[in-house]
Every structure is written in C-alpha cells, then in structure tokens.
C-alpha cells in the first residue's frame, strides 16, 4: 500500500531532506497515506514533531523510541506494534545540522483486512468467471475443430453405407481432422467413379451378350429353314441340296465364331484369358486377311481395300486373337454399313512396329 510513498521519501531524503521539517509537506504526504489506511509519524532527535493520527499517538509514541534503538542504519525497518494492530515502516537519516530525523509509515492492519477479504472474494469470483469463459471457449473450439467435422464425417459414412455417393463433404480446416475429411472426400469421389465405371461396364457386358444372342438367332433360323427345306423335299436335286448344305455350313461357321467370341469374353471376365505368342510376319498375314475380307465385303454389296507396306515386319503376337480382333472390326463394319459403303484396312510403320487401322467410310479405328 505504501510502496510509492516509500520511493518518494527516498527521493526527498536524497535531494531535500530538510523538507521533512515542513509541516505543510508532511500534512500533504499524510493526506495521501490516509487513502491507503495509513498515516505518517516524524520524530527529530527522538521527539515527535508530526503525527497524522492523534487517536493512536499515545500508544505508538511510547514504542517509537524502541524502534529507533533497534534500527540505526540508513535503511527501512519493518515492525509490528505490541498489539499487532499496526505495521510500522521506519526510515532514519541525518540532517545537515547533525540532527536525526525518523520517518514512520504506520498502516492499520485491522482496517486493511476487510479490503483484503474483499479482494480475495473478488479474485475468487473472477477466477471462477475466467474458468467458465475459458471452458466455454474451449468447448466451442473443440466442437468447431473436432466434433463438427466428425459429425459430418459420420453423416458421410451413413450416406455411403446407404449407397448414396452424390454428396460433398466440405471441411475447410487444414488440421489432422480436416485432412482426414479431405482424404475421405477423395475416397468418395474415386468410389463414385469406380461405381459408375462398373455400372457402365455391366451395361456394356449385357448389351454385348444381348447382341451376340440376337446374332445367333439369325444363323440358327437360317439353318433351321434350310434343313426343313431339305426335309420337305424342296431341295429335290443334288445341286440344290449341295447349295443348301453350303449355306448351312457357312451359317454354322458364323455361329462358331459368335460362340467363340462369347467364350473369349467369359474367359476375359474370369481372368483366364490365355495367349500364345509367336513371331508373326505382319505383311503376308495382313495381305491374306485382306483377301478374305474383300470377299466378305463384296458379298454384302460393299467395297474393300487394303494398303499393306512391303518388307518384313516381325512382331510378337497371338496370331489367332489378333485375327479375331480384326475379324470383329470388319464384321461390324459389314454388318452396320450400308450397301455401297467402303471399308479399308491399312498398316503404317511406327517406330519398331506397325499401326493397323480399319476405317469405315472415313471413320477409323486403330
């Protein structure tokens, strides 16, 4: 309470010690100390020259001489009176004329205790309020940074569990939980893409099986019709019978090809596709196929041309499966092309191999 007063007294002792005999200055100093539940006492050569509180003067005046004998150094001494009601701070110094001044700062402990209790009470309630505010801020931070993202993550998990992938997990935080949510969002996107690819693949597989089944009906119907014609005696000459048998044989080849395609597709689906690689000279291989495809196109009212480079181009390939791929491309061009359309087979040298291209009326498939 009186620390600032002590510093001021030390400054005055160093600069103007005579001022402690000035009653007006001592009165002003005492007035400021009264606000701090304290008062001022000053003695000169052991005689009291100023006291700021007359009520306690008689009891303290008998004790200050004892304090003067105890503390004869140029420093502050701290004492309690006999009744422990006052805390006394003492400072002695010497004036220029050799007289000795003693300054006493007396604080009434009994008056201070209620303020100390009030201060402690205020500090307690302030601490409780700070704890509540801090707890509330921590709760809000935990909810915003942890519980809220986890809640959105839980909701996203339920959406995926129910098969719904058309949503977005928006978490902008860049902490560990935010990164977890971002990784979960990337997983959802990839899972959605994979699901869409699977749906598209299943659709294409069903369409392929449906197309092959439909394609099988045509040769089967034709074979059935020609067999019935033979049975009913429509083919009543050896020439007609031979012609009917040739058609039946050709239709059976078409069926065999379609069944082989279905078998290859099933093996591919089951991951059991086997390849038999060998060295193949592509120029004669493609020229032989070109002659075969030319006849197929001619029979369907279409034209076929091929441009195969000269020279030897040895590649490693499965001859049968490569032929089957080209057969499928050409047969689709023939099947879905219009009479008078043009089909072309070409090959161009590319680095250490060939690029084979099949085109139908200008639309190429490599």
Image (cartoon, rainbow, N blue to C red):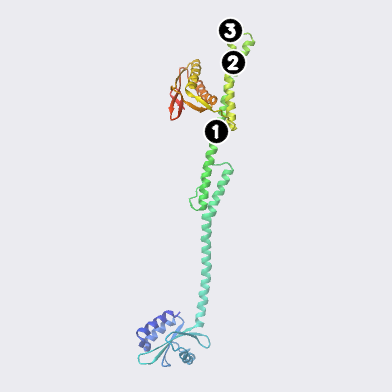
Residue visible at 57% across and 16% down in the picture? 250
Tag nearer the camera, 3 or 1: 3
Considering only order in the chain, which callout, 1 or 2, is on the residue closer to the N terminus? Answer: 1
Considering only order in the chain, which callout, 2 or 3, is on the residue closer to the N terminus? Answer: 3
> Residue 1, located in which quarter of the rendered image?
bottom left
Considering only order in the chain, which callout, 1 or 3, is on the residue closer to the N terminus? Answer: 1
The label shown at residue 239 is 3
Q: CA distance from mark 2 to mark 1?
A: 34 Å
Image coordinates for residue 91, horizontal then vertical, percent: 43, 86
Direction from residue 340 to residue 270 in the image, left or right? right
Image coordinates for residue 308, horizontal then vertical, percent: 44, 22
From this view, report whether residue 361 is shown above or below residue 238: below
* Residue 113 visible in image: yes
Task: Classify mark 1: residues with Cα within 10 Å, few (<14), some (14-19) or many (20+).
Answer: few
Which is nearer the eye, 238 or 150?
Answer: 238
Residue visible at 58% across and 13% down in the picture? 246
From this view, report whether residue 47 is shown above or below residue 191: below
* Residue 213 visible in image: no
Residue hosting label 1: 201
Residue hosting label 2: 249
């Amino acid at each position: 309470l009186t620390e600032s007063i002590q510093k001021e007294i030390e400054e005055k002792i160093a600069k103007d010690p005579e001022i402690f005999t000035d009653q007006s200055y001592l009165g002003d100093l005492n007035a400021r100390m009264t606000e701090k539940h304290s008062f001022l006492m000053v003695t000169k050569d052991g005689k009291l020259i100023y006291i700021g509180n007359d009520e306690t003067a008689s009891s303290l005046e008998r004790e200050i001489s004892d304090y003067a004998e105890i503390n004869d150094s140029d420093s502050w001494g701290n004492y309690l009176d006999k009744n422990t009601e006052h805390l006394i701070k003492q400072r002695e110094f010497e004036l220029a004329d050799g007289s000795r001044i003693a300054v006493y700062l007396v604080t009434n402990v009994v008056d201070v205790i209620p303020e100390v209790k009030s201060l402690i009470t205020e500090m307690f309630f302030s601490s409780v309020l700070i704890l509540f505010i801090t707890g509330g801020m921590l709760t809000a931070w935990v909810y915003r940074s942890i519980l809220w993202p986890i809640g959105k993550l839980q909701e996203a998990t339920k959406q995926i569990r129910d098969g719904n992938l058309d949503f977005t997990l928006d978490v902008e935080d860049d902490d560990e939980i935010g990164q977890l949510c971002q990784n979960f969002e990337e997983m959802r996107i990839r899972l959605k893409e994979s699901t869409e690819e699977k749906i598209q693949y299943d659709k294409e597989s069903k369409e392929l099986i449906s197309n092959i089944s439909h394609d099988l009906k045509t040769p089967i119907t034709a074979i059935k019709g020609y067999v019935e014609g033979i049975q009913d005696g429509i083919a009543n000459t050896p020439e007609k019978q031979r012609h009917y048998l040739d058609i039946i044989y050709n239709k059976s080849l078409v069926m065999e090809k379609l069944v082989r395609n279905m078998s290859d597709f099933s093996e591919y689906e089951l991951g059991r596709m086997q390849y038999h690689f060998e060295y193949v000279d592509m120029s004669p291989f493609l020229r032989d196929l070109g002659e075969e495809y030319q006849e197929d196109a001619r029979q369907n009212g279409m034209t076929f041309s091929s441009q195969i480079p000269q020279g030897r181009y040895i590649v490693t390939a499965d001859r049968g499966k490569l032929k089957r791929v080209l057969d499928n491309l050409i047969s689709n061009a023939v099947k879905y092309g219009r009479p008078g359309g043009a089909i072309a087979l070409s090959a161009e040298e590319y680095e250490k191999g060939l690029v084979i291209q099949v085109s139908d009326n200008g639309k190429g498939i490599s």
